[in-house]
Image: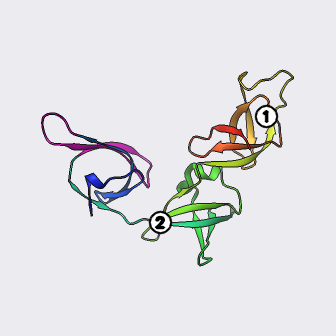
């Protein structure tokens, strides 16, 4: 148990028999009346976002989430297979649970898998990854970094927008949260 004064971003709460992740929170002390906490919560399983206001000092139940570093081995056609780096056990994760992480994950890469009571909640990747461009239209002479963007396919099969001067075979840095091009690697 914790109070609303102990909230932190990324904390998992158990409210109404559902798991919610704190996306952001703000303590508010109005000039008149009691203090309260304004939070933005995301349902861990469905991904639904809600805004919730709670009284300051209110007790909330926290969920103990086990975060493990695991290595992505392969995609067997249905599930993504991870290996625990400590005990070498294999874990199957569904594409729905993977979410957008599947667009940026290569074989033998490490990721953090969050589990609650034996159920996989989500997969966390580093904030950026380096991937190679497997296909893009060739750039033209005189193309500059601020001239515009063109589509490019990454080695995972995901398509992003890159500047016109980026060629096929170039390694680029990609933001895993938004899927945006960050620069050449």
> Which tag is nearer the camera, tag 2 or tag 1?
1
Q: Is residue 108 above or below residue 135?
A: below
Residue 182, percent from left and from top: 66, 38
Mark 2: secondary structure: strand
Task: Give the residue number, with chain letter if any, for mark 2.
Answer: 115
The colour mode here is rainbow
Task: Return the residue found at the far left.
Answer: 33
Task: Return the residue found at the far bottom.
Answer: 87
Whether residue 108 is in magenta: the answer is: no
First in residue order: circle 2 vs circle 1: 2
Would you identify the image quadrant in which residue 83 lies?
Answer: bottom right
Task: Give the residue number, with chain letter if any, for mark 1.
Answer: 166
Would you identify the image quadrant in which residue 133 lies?
Answer: top right
Residue 181, percent from left and from top: 67, 37
Mark 1: secondary structure: loop
Which span of residues is magenta-colored? Answer: 29-54
Residue in the picture at 56% in, 44% down: 177
Look at the image and tell me in which quarter the C terminus lies.
top right
Q: Is residue 13 above or below residue 71?
A: above
Give the label on residue 40, or none. none
Residue 134, percent from left and from top: 80, 44
Q: Is residue 61 above or below residue 26?
A: below
- Choose between 17 and 125: the one closer to the eye: 125
Would you identify the image quadrant in which residue 96 lies?
Answer: bottom right
Task: Return the residue found at the far right.
Answer: 141
Residue in the picture at 16% in, 33% down: 31
Q: Pointer 1: residues within 10 angstroms few (<14), some, or many (20+)?
A: many
Side (left or right) of 150 relative to 34: right
Q: Is residue 38 above or below residue 17?
A: above
- Tell me how many marks there are: 2
- Choose between 97 and 2: the one closer to the eye: 2
């Amino acid at each position: 148990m914790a109070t609303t004064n102990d909230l932190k971003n990324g904390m998992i709460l158990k409210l109404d028999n559902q798991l919610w992740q704190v996306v952001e929170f703000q303590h508010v002390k109005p000039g008149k009346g009691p203090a309260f906490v304004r939070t933005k919560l995301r349902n861990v399983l469905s991904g639904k976002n809600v805004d919730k206001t709670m009284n300051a000092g209110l007790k909330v139940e926290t969920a103990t989430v086990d975060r493990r570093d695991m290595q992505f081995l392969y995609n067997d056609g249905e599930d993504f297979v991870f290996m625990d780096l400590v005990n070498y056990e294999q874990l199957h994760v569904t594409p729905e649970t993977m979410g957008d992480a599947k667009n940026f994950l290569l074989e033998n890469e490490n990721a953090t898998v969050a589990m609650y009571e034996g159920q996989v909640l989500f997969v966390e990747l580093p904030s950026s990854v380096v991937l190679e461009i497997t296909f893009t239209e060739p750039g033209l002479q005189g193309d500059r970094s601020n001239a515009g963007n063109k589509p490019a396919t990454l080695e995972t099969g995901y398509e992003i927008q890159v500047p016109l001067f980026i060629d096929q075979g170039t390694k680029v840095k990609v933001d895993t949260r938004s899927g945006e091009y960050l620069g050449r690697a």
